[in-house]
Amino acid sequence: MIAYAQSTGSIIVEDGTYTVKDGTAFWAGNGANITINGGTFIGENTLDYTLIYSSGGVIDIYDGFFQCKGNGGILNVADANRNTARINLYGGTFVNQDPTKTQDPNNILLAEGYTVVSETQENGDVWYTVVKK
């Protein structure tokens, strides 16, 4: 894990490249907040890990490039903390996973006035980008 915000902690990510193998890159738990303003986030997971994970915290994504090259997912919230866990999407590009088509439609939310556009790349990957309407 690269960073774990707990309780009333707060993390702001401005840029950088974050690669994890069989783990979670950023995790917000129990009232913490993570704001992602940019960066590249790569999961090289052979196991079923999630790249960006909320367990009772709030994660706001304004920009960034997110990709899982294995079995893991990009975004997820903890089952036990669905009443407080949330991921808000204001931007970002997500490779091969539409961030609005998850098992957590009430907890992974597209911000009002935003939509997702998709673009198929030459290699067959589909990039889903959150943009203002």
Image: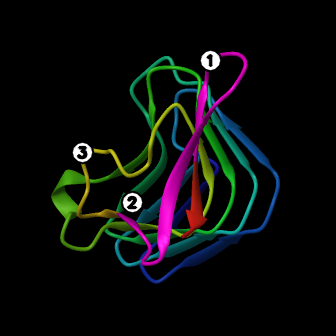
Q: Nearer the viewer, residue 115 or 19?
A: 115
Q: Quadrant of the C terminus?
A: bottom right
Q: How is the image coloured?
A: rainbow
- The three-letter amino acid code for the residue at tag 1 is Gly
Relative image position of residue 68 (x, y in whole percent): 56, 30
Q: Quote the CA–CA distance across marks 3 and 2.
A: 14 Å
Front label number (2 vs 1)? 1
- In primary-sequence order, the first of circles 2 and 1 is 2
Stretch in magenta:
109-128
Name the residue rendered at 81%, 60% in the picture. 15
Residue that label 3 marks: 103
Q: Quote the CA–CA distance across marks 1 and 3.
A: 24 Å
Q: Quote the CA–CA distance across marks 2 and 1.
A: 30 Å
Look at the numbered disc 3 and give the secondary structure of its residue.
loop
Mark carried by residue 54 = 2
Mark carried by residue 124 = 1
- In primary-sequence order, the first of circles 3 and 2 is 2
